[in-house]
Amino acid sequence: MSSSINTYARDIGIEFDVTDIRRHFPILNRTVRGNQLVYLDNAATTQKPNQVIEALTNYYTENNANVHRGIHALAEEATQAYEKARVKISEFIGSKKSSQIVFTRGATESINLIAYSWALNNLSPGDRIVLTEMEHHANLVPWLKVAKDTGAELKYIPVLPNGLLDLDSIHKIITPQTKLVSLVHVSNVLGTINQIEEITRIAHENGAVVLVDGAQAVPHMSVDVNALDVDFYAFSSHKMIGPTGIGVLYGKSHLLEEMEPFNFGGEMIREVRYDHASWADVPHKFEAGTPNIAGAVGLHAAVDFLQSIGMKNIHAYESELVRYAMERLEAIEWIKVLGPDRSIQRGGMTSFIIDGIHPHDIATFLDSLGIAVRAGHHCAQPLHRKLGIPSTTRASFYLYNTKTEIDALIDGLEQTRRFFLS
């Protein structure tokens, strides 16, 4: 298998060795139900390389201490490692300074931070919040509550039958009444890569703030928040080979400085008296309590690993993987693939349905073969309802996946259909 993998990488001009990349991920060597693991659930979470695992172990065995408050050696080392991770992330996504990077528990908490700290203090009746019809619940449910609490109205940019946003409708939806536009960079169901620059430009022309959910973008492609000119950008570590439990919120400095924190306690204060308190400077005023120090260290190691390969290389490789997967899936008449067709660049995932077989049954049968996929509504119930289907099966790819594994998926789907429908 390694020879075909390497030939495949060379054929599409990728400057990394996929066999060598897989060698760094120990879990890929295991078997599941007696079969070699084929892990195709990367949009849910990604596997971790030895470098990340070792970074976590080294932190806990060599540097474990609380940050920012101690003057002993371990505390200084832990603080330095934590803040170095902030600098690394800042550089990775093109922000102007590290103070624009707030560590959170994940993209979900990052979005909720904006909902509580910015939206509830800046929106009122008559204002408009604009989302898209392809949003993950994490970028929809918070705005339902904000709209209810503030009296602002919600409007949605429609999704066309081809899986793309209806950009012709934007000028009618994003108006001077719009105060916030919040949208996903890459859909976790359709794989659609949205035109963030164009939408941001229109939003800013109308005086609106822009928040982007980048959970499915940052792990897979080069993202420059400064070039995109977005006001806020959220993403998660665990979807980019980093640890669970830590995420990132990027924000423009003037907005972060104007915002009130939504978590209170230790670490985020400047001064506390019995009758009042004042807050630390950004980003620390948003990081109450002991942060996920080990998670930040692990995320730093994850970014180092990704950068050693090159985000452009990763994106090119994944684009070819998803093109091949769609080519194989679309050649089968009883499989319907959702989202943009192969002529349009899309993220590294495919969601599909098979008439007569429930997605949960498909995923369960594939699991018996050692193939891990995701089945359900993928935290996007309104989108599935719009598409007229309750759920889908999703195969999602990352830098360590191969064409051989996609072939195994296709073979598994053919076995699934024979089992349930023959």
Image (cartoon, rainbow, N blue to C red):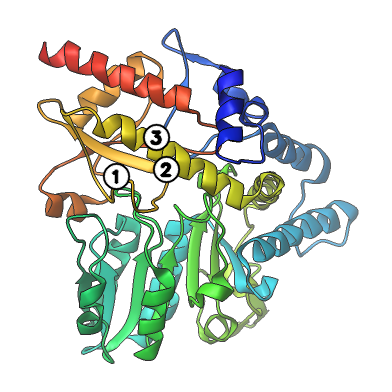
Q: Quadrant of residue 132?
A: bottom left
Q: Which residue is mark 3?
A: 324
Q: Nearer the viewer, mark 2 or mark 3?
A: 3
Q: Position of residue 253 (x, y in %)?
A: 59, 82
Could you say where residue 54 lies in the image, as x and y percent from the top left?
73, 35
Q: Is residue 215 left or right of residue 419?
A: right
Question: What's the amino acid at mark 3?
Answer: Tyr
Residue marked by disc 1: 378
Kindly identify which residue carries mark 2: 43
Q: CA distance from mark 1 to mark 2?
A: 10 Å
For badge 1, the amino acid type reads His
Q: In the image, is residue 411 above or below residue 156?
A: above
Amino acid type of the residue that numbered disc 2 sits on in the rendered structure: Ala
- Residue 134, given in percent of the width and then of the height, sits at 26, 58
Residue 263, visible in the rendered structure: yes
First-in-chain label (3 vs 1): 3
Residues at circles 3 and 1 in contact by the CB criterion of under 8 Å: no
Q: Secondary structure at mark 3?
A: helix
